[in-house]
Image (cartoon, rainbow, N blue to C red):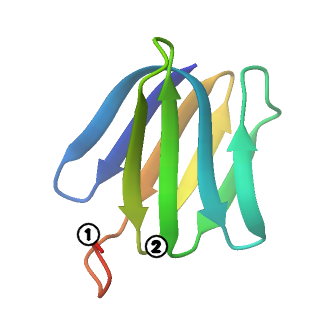
Amino acid sequence: MNVRVVTTDEVLWVGKARSVVVPSADGDLGILPGRQPILAVLRQGKGRVTAEDGQVFTFPIVAGFVSCDNDEIEVVLDNTGEGYGD
């Protein structure tokens, strides 16, 4: 899967990944290759990307959304509020 994790001012991570886990408004959302298209609102918590080489990248989430379509995943974060970096 091709994954991009971005905020309004910077790109936090770009690369190929085995999985992505983010806290959606409806509960934790795990994304694996071949997932049906989805657009979900994110709640505060921690996101995790497991890269193809097995390395894990974690990042704080205050708010945002995730989109998934044809193994193209984009996590867009609004980390301007309280709790960013906690």
Answer above or below: position of 62 versus 73.
Answer: below
Q: Secondary structure at mark 1?
A: loop
* Residue on which disc 2 sits: 63
The answer to whether 78 appears left or right of 56 in the picture is left
User: Quadrant where the N terminus lies?
Assistant: top right
Q: Quadrant of residue 33?
A: top right
Q: Residue at horizontal 50%, vertical 45%?
A: 48
From this viewpoint, which residue is outermost toward the right?
A: 36
The answer to whether 8 appears left or right of 34 in the picture is left
Amino acid type shown at disc 2: Ala
Q: Residue at horizontal 35%, vertical 69%?
A: 78
* Percent of width and height locating residue 52: 51, 13
Q: Secondary structure at mark 2?
A: loop
**Closer to viewer: mark 2 or mark 1:** 1
From this viewpoint, which residue is outermost toward the top?
A: 53
Spatial CA distance of label 2 from label 1 is 13 Å
Answer above or below: position of 67 versus 9.
Answer: above
Find out whether the residues at labels 2 and 1 contact each other: C-beta distance under 8 Å. Answer: no
Viewer-side residue, 57 vs 26: 57
Answer above or below: position of 81 versus 24.
Answer: below
* Percent of width and height locating residue 64: 47, 66
Amino acid type shown at disc 1: Gly
Tell me, for residue 62, which label it has, or none.
none
Viewer-side residue, 55 vs 37: 55
* Percent of width and height locating residue 70: 69, 22
Mark 1, residues whose alpha carbon is within 10 Å: few (<14), some, or many (≥20)?
A: few
* Percent of width and height locating residue 7: 29, 56
The answer to whether 69 appears left or right of 26 in the picture is left
Q: In the rendered structure, which disc, 2 or 1, sits on the residue that comes first in sequence? A: 2
* Residue on which disc 1 sits: 85
Mark 2, residues whose alpha carbon is within 10 Å: few (<14), some, or many (≥20)?
A: many
Q: Residue at horizontal 50%, vertical 75%?
A: 44
